[in-house]
Amino acid sequence: MTTEKNIILNHQEITNKIRRIAYQIYESNVNETEVILAGIDQNGYQLANELKTILENISDIKPILCRVIIDKKNPLNPIETSIKSEDYKNKSIVLIDDVLNSGTTLIYGVKHFLDVPLKQFKTAVLVNRNHKKYPVKADFKGISLSTSLHEHIHVNLTNGKAEAYLE
């Protein structure tokens, strides 16, 4: 059985979505001197890195990158971050991932960061699939897409040929 690949976002569209999300992050943090961009390992972290570059070009805000390592199959396992909790205490955080599907990864990521007091907490995703089983939402999203539970969204953020497609 062959699976059909339907492009939902091409490279230019992804670039435009990331840029728009960066402006939204800037607007919601306009009075901040720093913002923590907490990217969920792999695509979320890569997305956070691209957002960091744009934020540095469009604002005076200092974006601090944080890698969030979550076991997506066992989200109750300890979550690791590349910065210590005292480094994000009383700061503004944006938790970033490529696709919001059931909300499991984001909700456990949110839970991890709530162990310390924060100034503001937002979430950002490139694709919001609308299949949430947890009360978590994307504050900033590139695209919302209603799909069947049997379909899968793949995001490839390789430089020069980024794409998001549905299988």
Image: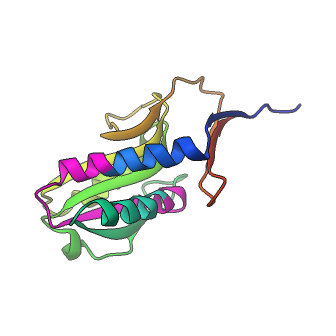
Magenta stretch bounds = 23-46
- Asked if one can make out residue 154 in the rendered structure from this viewpoint, the answer is no
Q: Is residue 82 above or below residue 5?
A: below
Query: Does 34 appear in magenta?
Result: yes
Question: Relative to residue 22, is residue 14 drawn left or right?
Answer: right
Q: Please state which of residues 71 and 56 is positioned toward the viewer in this rendering.
A: 56
Residue 45 in view here = yes
User: Residue 89 at what x, y percent from top left?
Assistant: 16, 68
Q: Which residue occupies 62% across, 51% down?
A: 162
**Where on the picture, by quarter, is residue 141?**
top left
- Looking at the image, residue 17 sits to the left or right of residue 135; the answer is right
What percent of the width, then of the height, locates residue 98? 50, 48
Classify the position of the C terminus by image quarter. Answer: top right
Position of the N terminus, as image quadrant, is: top right
**Residue at the image position 33 percent from the left and 41 percent from the top:** 140
Q: Nearer the viewer, residue 51 or 74?
A: 51
- Residue pictured at 12% horizontal, 64% vertical: 90
Residue 145 belongs to the span the image colors magenta: no
Residue 148 in percent (x, y) is at 60, 23
Against 154, is 120 above or below? below
Residue 99: x %, y % from top left: 50, 43
